[in-house]
Structure formats: C-alpha cells, structure tokens
Amino acid sequence: MTSHTHGLVLGLLLTITALVALLVGIGVAWLRLIDGATRPAAVLRGGAAFGATLTIAAAFLAVVWR
C-alpha cells in the first residue's frame, strides 16, 4: 500500500472510533436518564464515557498502527 492509502485507512479507523465513542456516550446518558438521574448529570456521565472510550480506542489504534 502507498502512504496515501495508509492515511485514508487511518482516517477511516479514527472516524469509526469517534462514532463508536459517540454511541457509547449516548447510550450511557440514556441509561442514566432511565435510572432517574437529572439531565445535567446524565449528560456529564455520557460525556465522561465518550471521552474515556475515545481515549482508550485512540491509544489502542496508536499501538496497533505501528
């Protein structure tokens, strides 16, 4: 593969990672709302889940991509 193709694949993987993290964050916020939390508390928990998922997945990609 050329370096151009490697860049496209990495961009696609990062996009998929961001979308998965977004889905996790939305899911966690939704579950917190069902559990009876206030909206601000649910949004904060969903944001924390999004950030944690994105961080772990990006670190995993950084290790595997080498």
Image: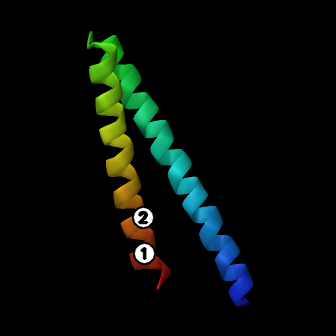
Q: Which residue: 42% across, 64% down? A: 58
Q: Residue furthest front?
A: 40
Whether residue 19 sits left or right of residue 30 in the image: it is: right
Relative to 37, residue 41 above or below: below
| Residue 7 position by quadrant | bottom right
- Give the colour scheme of this rendering: rainbow
| Residue 16 position by quadrant | bottom right
Give the x, y percent position of residue 53: 37, 50
Label 1 packing within 10 angstroms: few (<14), some (14-19), many (20+): few
Q: Residue furthest top?
A: 36
SS state under label 2: helix
The N terminus sits in image quarter: bottom right
Give the x, y percent position of residue 46: 35, 32
Whether residue 37 sits left or right of residue 63 in the image: it is: left
Give the x, y percent position of residue 34: 34, 12
Return the residue at label 2: 58
Label 2 packing within 10 angstroms: few (<14), some (14-19), many (20+): some
How many numbered discs, if any? 2
Checking the image for residue 62, the label placed there is: 1
Give yes or no for contact between labels 2 and 1 (Cβ–Cβ under 8 Å).
yes
Whether residue 60 sits left or right of residue 9 in the image: it is: left
Checking the image for residue 2, the label placed there is: none
Amino acid, disc 2: Ala
Amino acid, disc 1: Ala
